[in-house]
Amino acid sequence: VLTQSPGALSLSPGERATLSCRASQSVPSNYLAWYQQKPGQAARLLIYDASSRATGVPDRFSGGGSGTDFTLTITRLDPEDFAVYYCQQYGTSPLTFGGGTKVEIK
Amino acid sequence: EVQLVESGGGLVQPGWSLRLSCAASGFTFEDYAMHWVRQAPGKGPEWVSGISWRGGVIGYAESVKGRFTIARDNADNTLSLHMYSLRLEDTAVYYCAKANEPRRWLVGKWGQGTLVTVSS
């Protein structure tokens, strides 16, 4: 089970966002990904293998952590970053998603 | 450009069957694992099923095991999901997704999805 916190985050553009994802068991090989989803759109892969940025993802997005505790950091929020973020583990089957963190404009 | 185009969604009654298809283009299909991910209205994503690049490894979520069957045709660049004994809780947008890298299981790009509504 992946537990994301907080459930929602109210921040202003330019601020730093730190999102947490905690796994109930250690994620094999740190196979942990982060996705961004905007209303009415499919999710977009941001981070994989806990800390590798996907192609085309701005460097203000960074992932960290290992084992059971992982974080997604957005250093300076851009207006286009307000969205819902999900973590997902793909180290064991079935693949599982966290419940999401909504980053909203303050 | 990678394109994943789902089709086959619609309105069905509980207990009915439905077959979803995904037409893939813009990449070497036979090198990539493929997945189905669904998202119920107002909920987070749920991984449904995945199949390795040659079809030798298949996985299912517990919620669909024994009712859904994933398959791929590498000659035709298509992915399918056969859904049987549909339940109200299967109502969702179903997304076809490709792995991010060849020969890896990680879910990368998603299609735009097809809506499946199970209702009496």
Image: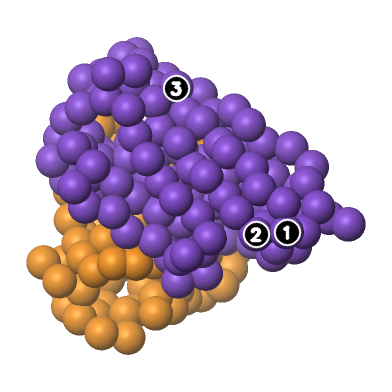
Chain colours: A orange, B purple
Res B89 visible: yes
Which one is earlier in the sequence, the residue at label 1 or at label 2? 1
Residue A16 percent coordinates (x, y): 40, 58
Question: Which residue is the site of mark 3?
Answer: B23
Task: Say what secondary structure mark 3 lies in.
Answer: strand
Chain under callout 2: B
Q: Is residue B56 left or right of residue A34?
A: left
Q: CA distance from mark 3 to mark 1?
A: 26 Å
Query: For the residue marked with disc 2, what is the amino acid?
Result: Ser
Toward which corner of the image does residue B80 lie, by quadrant? Answer: top left
Res A89 visible: no
Query: For the residue marked with disc 3, what is the amino acid?
Result: Ala
Chain under callout 1: B
**Callout 3: few (<14), some (14-19), or many (20+) C-alpha neighbours within 10 Å?**
some
- The image quadrant where one finds the C terminus of chain A is bottom right
Toward which corner of the image does residue A59 lie, by quadrant? Answer: top left
Which label sits on residue B15?
A: 1
Question: Are the residues at dot 3 and dot 2 in contact (C-beta closer than 8 Å)?
Answer: no
Task: Say what secondary structure mark 2 lies in.
Answer: loop
Which label sits on residue B85?
A: 2
Which label sits on residue B99?
A: none
> Mark 1 vs mark 2: same chain?
yes
Residue drawn at the location 73% of the way across and 59% of the way down? B15
Q: CA distance from mark 1 to mark 2?
A: 4 Å
